[in-house]
Image (tube, grey):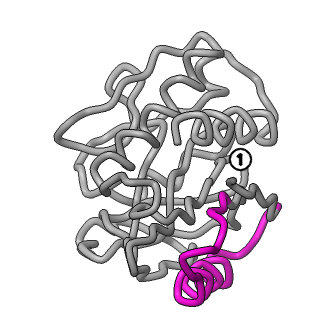
Amino acid sequence: MVITRQLGVQDYAPVWHDMQQFTQNRSAETADELWVVEHHPVYTLGLNGKREHLLNVGNIPVINTDRGGQVTYHAPGQVVVYTLLDIKRLNINIRELVTLLEGAMISTLADYGIMAKARAEAPGVYVQDKKIGSIGLRIKKNCSYHGLSLNNAMDLTPFDGINPCGYQNLKVTQVSALGVNLSSQQLASSITQAIIKAL
């Protein structure tokens, strides 16, 4: 049983703190949840995030967060799915969870005629060498939080202000740039269904 929650457009920090709280307070019986959200413009730095990858952030806030990975950007028009899962109960490890989330994005994009692939050396999902989907996770008490983001129809310019995921000159793309016009709700629904199916 996986509960899906639609959170709409929210500031990053309160949702992050809610995830921490949820994970802290959950028990062996707590149902797993997927939280679907879009964030107001924000850069987030993962636990290994190096500030040198912030090149020109302008007046967009930067938040140091507790997920894995480097720096990324969130804004409306990007689908974010937070995966609040008991991975011990699901009998999967973190590497398998990353692969599962990459697979969910790849199969969703394939449904809309977009060929995407994962890279062993750099987690996430790519279309023709441009990054379209990112993954950052944290495991606590054998449970995951944070999750994935997939660029749908957003202003990509702020990605120029960082080295996305810590890679210099890494270009990003999005669903709308590939000739597919979807609402974020449609895209999120496809991804959450793919995740639930894979679990």
Badge 1: how crowded within 10 Å, few (<14), some, or many (20+)?
many
Give the percent coordinates (x, y) of residue 167: 24, 50
Between 56 and 19, the one nearer to me in the picture: 19
Between 54 and 26, the one nearer to me in the picture: 26
Q: Is residue 193 highlighted in magenta?
A: no
Q: Circle 1 is placed at which residue position?
A: 77
Residue 11: quarter of image? bottom right
Give the percent coordinates (x, y) of residue 76: 72, 55
Q: Which residues are magenta?
A: 8-34
Residue 176: quarter of image? top right
Residue at the (70%, 19%) spot, across then down: 180
Q: Please, what secondary structure does the residue beneath circle 1 have?
A: loop
Q: Is residue 33 highlighted in magenta?
A: yes
Q: Is residue 121 left or right of residue 171?
A: left
From this view, report whether residue 8 is shown above or below residue 140. above
Q: Amino acid at mark 1?
A: Gly
Give the percent coordinates (x, y) of residue 61: 55, 78
Q: Is residue 161 left or right of residue 7?
A: left
Between 199 and 109, the one nearer to me in the picture: 199
Residue at the (45%, 67%) spot, across then down: 144
Give the percent coordinates (x, y) of residue 152: 65, 37
Residue at the (61%, 25%) spot, across then down: 177
Between 79 and 91, the one nearer to me in the picture: 91
Residue at the (64%, 37%) spot, across then down: 191
